[in-house]
Image (spheres, rainbow, N blue to C red):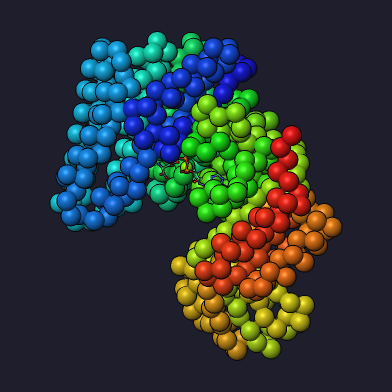
Amino acid sequence: MSGIVVAKFGGSLLRDGGGYITLAGEVEKLLSGGRRVTVTVSAMKGVTDELIEIVEKPVGWEPRLKRIMERYYSAARAAVTSEREATSLLGELSRLFDELFKLVWAVKVIGEVTPHARAAIVSFGERLSAAVAAATLRSQGIEAVWLDGREAGIVAEGDPWEATVDYKLSERLVRSKLLPLLEHRVVPVVTGFVAGTREGRTVLLGRGGSDYTATLLARFLGAEEVILYTDVPGVMSADPRRIPEARVIPRLSIAEAMELALLGAKRMHPKTFEPILDVDVTVRITMPGAEEATVVTREGGPPPLKAVVATEGLAVVTVTGGGLVGRIGVASKVTGIAAVNGVNILAIMQPITETRISLVVRRDDAERLARALEEGLRGLISGVDVSEASAVSVVGDGLRESRVAGHLVERAAALGGVESILWAPGSPILMALVRPGEEWETARLLHAEVLERWGTGSP
Ligand code: ADP
Ligand code: ASP
Ligand code: MG
């Protein structure tokens, strides 16, 4: 079936009933263009954070759950205009809240929460949202049904908070569940962020997981386009809340988009682009009603440099010692120790003299890694040093050219406060490490440089 589009609506848009009316308006436009539409929704804005807090802190959970309930009820009343749909939706929401109250009550009585129970409770933000979205569509005359990610066939195993998707099995199940609906011109509304194990237990796909759900569904359904609707008109050249001069980037290549997602730009899920690496799907990131958008394709387009991202909360862990010099396999020992301890390495630096190896990691992991390295490399090293850091990264396929990278290295080095610069030939990212607290000043300066010299690629 051709002409399938997956439309994802972020929590940033779903603040109240108006958000669901906007959703229905966009779906209507896509349908009237003759396309078949699958919708993916996030929880209402702030609800996931609130559910996590409720699970973790017992005080006052009942009034807090009731406040969430009130938000969904009032969105439902505002968005669902047909009386019949409104009545059946209110019944459905009440059943879902009943289930949610029972789950939270059980956790509070037992006094502890298992990872699966936590995932099940947090999934309600998306499930309630999907119920409201489907009823809003139906009340506007668009046939729609909602399914949670598990019912839609997304199978994932492992950590219930950040489960690993089984692509092969999910593809078969998603196609068998959603294609018949699409063939009959029914709009499936699938919860983002939520999946199920083979045994049918609820698991989640990690924070921001609805972006990932959207691209997974697009891959499995053979969609031609994914549209990520959000509250900004696209991915911007920097975080607009910190750097007001930021502009929308009109075109990104998949490689650039992947780097930006990994760095957390526009708070995209790090795996957003993974499902579509080897299939032909365009991703458009935009705001309803906006003329601008970011379009992600395999080829991308100008300008050579796209965005500047600041990352706080990092640390550089450095092992030093004469025992490292000329010893083959030390780097792999160091990275192996990080892997065994579940520490993700963001960058690695080793001078040619081999007297030290530095790893850039998340600050939360640094002390644990340092202790493990001391232990595991005893006799080989003279010490392990941990220093806090932030990073400012510039992303763009143009960095693969040494002329562009060379110029940027020169400018970054001249800024002062930049302690190291990481770039590898052929890589679309250049990362400058700075002292904590200096990241935004450096980001502003590099952003100004990037815009002035390379422009934004807008026509
Ligand atoms: P959604 O709920 O739609 O998934 P998020 O709240 O997760 O949206 O992410 C959108 C927000 O990300 C924007 O409101 C914006 O403030 C922030 N943001 C940070 N960096 C960027 C960037 N480079 N481009 C666009 N938005 C950014
Ligand atoms: N609601 C989830 C979160 O806040 C998933 C998402 O919004 O993409 O992380
Ligand atoms: Mg998001």
Q: Is residue 374 left or right of residue 76?
A: right
Report the residue that reaches farthest toward the right: 403
Q: In which quarter of the image is the C terminus?
A: top right
Q: Residue at x 23, y 17 (%)?
A: 87
Image location of residue 1, percent across then percent down = 60, 16
As drawn, 21 above or below 52: above
Q: Is residue 99 something that shows in the picture?
A: yes
Instruction: Locate residue 183 relative to residue 60 in the image: left or right.
Output: right
Residue 273 appears in view: no
Circle count = 0
- The reply, left or right, for residue 231 in relation to residue 139 is right
Q: On screen, 351 above or below 274?
A: below
Residue 419: give x, y in percent of width and height. Answer: 65, 74
Whether 121 is drawn above or below 142: the answer is below
Q: Quadrant of residue 88?
A: top left
- In front here: 165 or 274? 274
Q: Quadrant of residue 376?
A: bottom right
Q: Which residue appears at 52% of the width and 26% of the height?
A: 289
Where does residue 26 sit, x and y in percent of width and height?
49, 22
Say which residue appears at 68% left-offset and 52% top-offset.
395
> How far from the left and from the top, in percent, is residue 438?
56, 68
For image coordinates 39% across by 18% down, the residue present is 137
Judge by depth and name the residue closer to the eye, 425 or 371: 425
